[in-house]
Each structure stands twice: as structure tokens, then as C-alpha cells.
Amino acid sequence: MLLRKLLGDQGYKTVKKGMCDEHPIFAAGLGICSALAISNKVENAIAMGAGVTFVLIATAVMISTLRSLIPLRVRIITYMIIIASFVITVQMFLDAFSPTISEALGPYVGLIITNCIIMGRAEAFFMQNKVYHSVLDAISNGLAYSCTLIAISVVREVLGFGTLLGISVMPDSYEKWVVMTMAPGAFFLLGIAIWISKTISERRSEESKA
Amino acid sequence: MKLVRLLIDRLYDIRALNKLKPLIDAVDAAMFGPAETTEGGPHIVDNVDLKRYMSYVIVALLPATLASIYFYGWSVLRIIIVSYIVGGVVEVIFAIVRKKEIHEGFLVTGLIFPLVLPPTTPLWVVAVGVVFGVLFGKEMFGGTGRNIFNPALVGRLFITIAFPAIMTTNWQVPFTDAITSATPLAVYKTTGSMASIYDLFVGKTAGSMGETCRIAIIFGGLFLIFTKVSNWRIPVSYIGTVFVFAAIGNRLAPGSIAPPLFQVLTGGLLFGALFMATDPVTSPFTRMGKYSFGILCGILTVLIRSFSGYVEGVMFSIVIMNALAPLIDHIVLMLKYRPVKI
């Protein structure tokens, strides 16, 4: 409730929507590609989550400020230019400060440009709302995406490599689950997570109807 | 008898156990047979139902199971028990959450699954595989009768890919404890030498627990076919295709494709063709569909065995064809019942 007071009524609603009801991965099915590819190690997941969240917030600020100036007919191209410039910033930052992670993420940093979460939020939310709410929306969506990525990557790294953030956590006799280091492992985990979250949300909506 | 009846009736009365009703139902049905009778016609005047089908398959699997216990000792029984208990728990949890009755389908999956594992599989790997098989092979699609893939094969496939070291290198030689060797197919692939036909028939070669004793498998498979529980079309076309394709291929490329009789008798081909490809849920239901299912399975099996990194291809080809089964049926129906052009 403190959060509600802090953010204002509408702001709280925006955050709740972004984090639960319209969770980008579970509810909207956005950003699945990078969630599958990058969630093999916690380190990569954190870097990716931070990158996407940063780009989201920056785009939110830019687009919601400029939204009355952007001509509707070329709006998608405008989003692309704005998003791309921030993505390049992220890429250069990673290259400069942690080349190893940059190498591990490979092309996926550049592919943040095509991450549907950012485009989707820009089109659906940032174009219609003021800066404050847009930033709240960006933060909640970015956090929801990062948390999911990190949660999946924790399971995948522990099972697949026997390590957590590069530190070995399993006994020496531990048998590695090779499948978890490959994309199918992510598919299964993400599938289970979406299955559970859908079941819960269905239950909830049934209860609210009854 | 009366005491058990009384006890079960008492269980039904307890309010707190209402949630566990599927479990109590299952115990009740196992002890006394199902209480419900079909109302209204038309009927087939026979007590055909899922239960009888399933118990016939279990009976047919018994020879192979007993043979594997005879060859590999009591550890086989331990693996089967783990598979039944862990898989059963998953099944019961889903029945309770979904408020449905427990299906008998699991009795078969729970027995087939351990039979296609190497005898040295650690018990926890067995548990992982059966959980995955039941969860992703069956429950995800809505339970018994709605699955696309054979649940036992899905489980086997997952642990093969997840733990390649455990699942593909350690093969226990029958009648011994810890000596490991390669399977006849792997030996053929690396050295080109073949195990004797007699050894293959009796089961004196290394391999998965239930697939080595071919006589027991053929016996069980014929039992299923003669009682009309499974259809003869898929196994005949499957094994026949492997035989023919291997005969032709062996002439053309003797180095990579093994001779026909050896192909038919090694690996999981007989077990797969007789017990897994015939699964009525995951195979086509049209007659032509069954033939083409078997033929494609056979071609895929020989191709995977001869030209891929894997030694055995039965499991992969059946799963691939499971995915295509609805399509095959669709095409057959389309060709057979073309809409009339007006």
C-alpha cells in the first residue's frame, strides 16, 4: 500500500499491469526469443535484463516526450531510430567494460532493437501516456522481463553447468543436465512457467467472476 | 473382502478426503471393478474398455520383463518400482488438481519406460525421465488419450539428451555385475563385427533392459496381435521396411548399412515396433495411414542408424512419426473422401 501512495493511483495500476496482469513474457508472449537464447547463464541474463530495461526506460522518456511531434505515418521508423541509438549505446558500453559478457551475448545485444517488448510498449503505451507513467511502465516491464530471465537462468545454470554466477555449487559427482545448456531446456522451463502462470491467472479470473 | 469394502466406503464418507477422491476411486476400481455402467445404446456387447486393453498390454510385456529380471538381476525390479511410484505420484497430483479420475494408461507407460532404459541407469535418472515423460508427454496435452507423443519415449528421449554419458556408454553385460560394453549396434558401427544371431535372439547381448530378449518380445507382441489389442499393420510394415531397405542398402553401401537380419534383431526395433509404434493414441487410425506410418518409421530407423551420430534410431523415428500421425490420417482421408466438385 505504501507503493500505491508513493506512485499515485494510476501509477500503481500501471506497475501492477506491467509486473503481473500483462507480464510481457507470460501474458503477452513477447521477448521469447531472447529469453530462450540468453537464459543459459545467470551472468548473461543479468546483463541482458539490465540492457533491455535501460533501453526501455530511455525509449519511454524519449518517445513520450516527443509523442506529439512524431508524425503518425512514420512512427514505427521513429521508434526504430530511437531504440537503435540506445541499443548501440548499450553495446558499446558492454564492449568497453565487460568484453567477455559482450562476447557471450553475441548478436543478441544488437537484436534488442527487434525485441518485441520495446516496440510493443512504445506503440501501445509510450505514445499515449505522459513521461512519468511511461517510465513507470518501462521499469515494471523491464523488471518483469529481467526477473523471468534471471529465474530461468538460475535453474538452467545450476542444472546444466553445476554453477551459479560461475561459482561451482554442486558436488563433484554431479551429473550435468546437458539438455539445459541447449535451447530445448529453455523451451521446457519457459513452457512450465507459462503453464503455471496461465493456470493461476485463469483461476483468479474465474474466482473474480464467481 | 467385506472389510476392504467397508474401509473404502468409510473413506468416501470422510469430508476431509474429498479432494483425494480420484485416488480413492482408483483403489476402489482396482479392488472391485468400476461401479459405473454405460446407460443407453447402442452398445458393443462385450466388456471392452481401456482397462482391459491396458491389462492385456501388461500381460504381453510380462515375458520381456521377466527375461530382463533373469538377465540383469533384481536391480531391474527396483527401476520398475521407482518408475511406477514416481510416475504414479505425478499422475495422482494431476488427477486431483484437475478433479478427474486416474486413468489406467499409466500402468503401461510405467512399465514400458523402464524396459527401454539401460540396466545401469541410476534411480534418480529414472525418476527424472518418468516425470518428464508423464508431464510433457501426456499431461501437457490433456491426459490419457490426448497425447501426441508416446509418453515413455518422450521420457527416454529427454534423459538420453540430458545425460548422454549415463545413457549411451554404460551397458551392462547380462549375468554379470559391473562389466560394461557397447551394444551390438555400436560395436558394428565402430568395428564392423556382428553379434551372432543366436545371442541376439536369446538376449545375451548388451542393450536396454527389455529389448534384448527378442524371443520374449516376439511372444508378447504376437499375443497382442492375436488378441486384436494391437494392429498387425504397423509392426509388419515397420519391420518389413527395415528388412527390405537394409537388404537393398547393404548391397549399395555395405560399409555403413548393416545386413537386414542383423538390423531387425538388434537394438530396440522389435520392442519399438511391437509395443510402442502400435500405441493406438499416437499412431494413425486409417488403414493406409498405418502402412505409411510403419514404412516411414522403417526408413527413418535405417537412415538414423547408418548415417547419424546416434547408434540407435528406433526411438527417434517413432517420435518423429508420432508428430506426423495426424497429418498422415488427414491426407489419407482427403485422398479417400474427396469432396465432390460441383
Image (spheres, coloured by chain):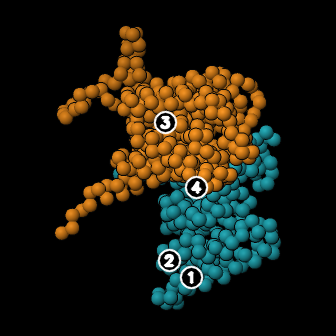
State which quadrant residue B97 falls in.
top left
- For mark 1, what is the residue? A79
Among the chains pictured, the one given orange colouring is: B
- For mark 3, what is the residue? B275
Q: Amino acid at mark 1?
A: Tyr
Of residue B74 and residue A140, the one placed in the foreground of this image is: B74
**CA distance separating discs 2 and 4:** 28 Å
Which hue is chain A drawn in? cyan
Across and down, in percent, residue A49 comes to 66, 65
Q: Is residue B8 above or below residue A73?
A: above
Parent chain of label 1: A
- In-image side of A109 versus B220 (left or right): right
Of residue B308 and residue B255, the one placed in the foreground of this image is: B255
Across and down, in percent, residue B249 comes to 58, 52
Of residue A207 and residue A44, the one placed in the foreground of this image is: A44
For label 2, count other residues whose C-alpha is less than 10 Å away and answer few (under 14), some (14-19) or many (20+).
some
**CA distance separating discs 3 and 4:** 29 Å
Q: Which mark is residue A123?
A: 2
- The residue drawn where x is 21% and y is 67% is B341
Of marks 2 and 4, the one in the foreground: 4
